[in-house]
Image (tube, rainbow, N blue to C red):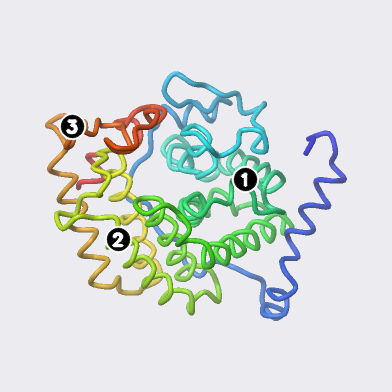
Amino acid sequence: MSASDPAAEQDVVRKLARGSFFSRLKSARQPLKLVAVPRDHVAGDRQRGEALLAGRFVAGSVAIPLADLDFASIGASDALAEQLQGFSWLRDLSAAASREKGAKLAEALVGRWLLAHGTRADDAWAPHLWGERILYWTAYAPYILSSGDSGYRSALLNTLARGARHLDANADKSPAGLKRVTAWCGVVAAGLLVQGGVPRVARGEAGLARALTTAQFDDGGLISRSPYEQALLVDRLGMLRSCYQAAKQTIPDGIEAAAAAALAALHGIAMGDSALSSWQGCGPGDASPEQPREKPVGGPRHAQPLNALMS
């Protein structure tokens, strides 16, 4: 959608703010809201956050001017696009800016995403991307829900709720492994944190338990044997634990045990300087020996601060 068509943009925002007919019936007495905001215990990359404030999204040697960023054109099929579409960069922004300083930029970019993808289920609605998006949108809600524009806030919350319903129906369609685990983490997080989502929690926990069973070996390591994905697994489960803490709920023993085993496995492949080692033929940034893929933009050390993940 062209930024020079403000009338069309306002029409999209109004449509998203109304939500579905069914959701309007259910929430007629009270606007949709988050019942809790989890804390992200992993610090972001301050340099990347400062680059965002300066108007650039930086990942490794790639830099994209935010002024030219179009979520509709970047797609969701490569590592760079997934970083943008999953909103993990909110962690970096928070490392460089307070809510007061960072909210304007965060809300502007979320608004662009809503205009590009909020009205239809397209590639950006891949279950693993929605799972990651829910984890980061809820953890950084103060950065993206501080606007005084009630239409924008309603559009964002209604879209988040639609994304959770989409995950309910599609999480198991994600490829087995990290992506399916991420999708089910999003289902559980939405159930814990979005108003009226309690019935979703038990279904999400059952789905997550199944996903972890098919994703991990007994040693807690992913079947892919990807060090990079192992770090992301620990990160996803750590963010989900924070959702339980924020909602004052107890994480199921099976999921807690899987998270502890995943962390132990990560300790086993981290070197003294916190860099990742190779693992059974899989390089630090590879998906798996059988299914090699392009190294994630920025590399595995850039993706997550391992000291924080393993603390």
Q: Is the residue marked by circle 3 packed among few (<14), some (14-19), or many (20+) residues within 10 Å?
A: some
- Which mark is first along the chain, 1 or 2? 1
Q: Which mark is residue 110?
A: 1
User: Disc 2 marks which amino acid?
Assistant: Leu
Residue 234, image x, y percentages: 28, 50
Q: Distance between the residues labelled 2 and 1?
A: 30 Å
The residue mark sitting in front, 2 or 1, is 2
Q: What's under tag 1, amino acid-wise?
A: Val
Give residue 265's position: percent from left, percent from top.
Answer: 16, 48
Q: Is residue 178 found left or right of 151 in the rendered image? A: left
Mark 3 or mark 2, earlier in chain: 2
Residue 34 lies in what quarter of the image? bottom right
Secondary structure of residue under mark 3: loop
The answer to whether residue 82 is above or below residue 30 is above
Which numbered tag is attached to residue 9? none
Kindly identify which residue carries mark 2.
Answer: 212
Q: Residue at 32% across / 62% down in the picture?
A: 241
Q: Which of 189 and 209 is in front in this view?
A: 209
Check contact, mark 1 vs mark 3: CB within 8 A.
no
Mark 1 or mark 3: which is in front? Answer: 3
Identify which residue, 108 or 213, lies in the foreground: 213
Please give the residue where the numbered disc 3 appears in the rendered image.
277
Q: How many neighbours does mark 1 have within 10 angstroms: few (below 14), some (14-19), or many (20 or more)? A: some
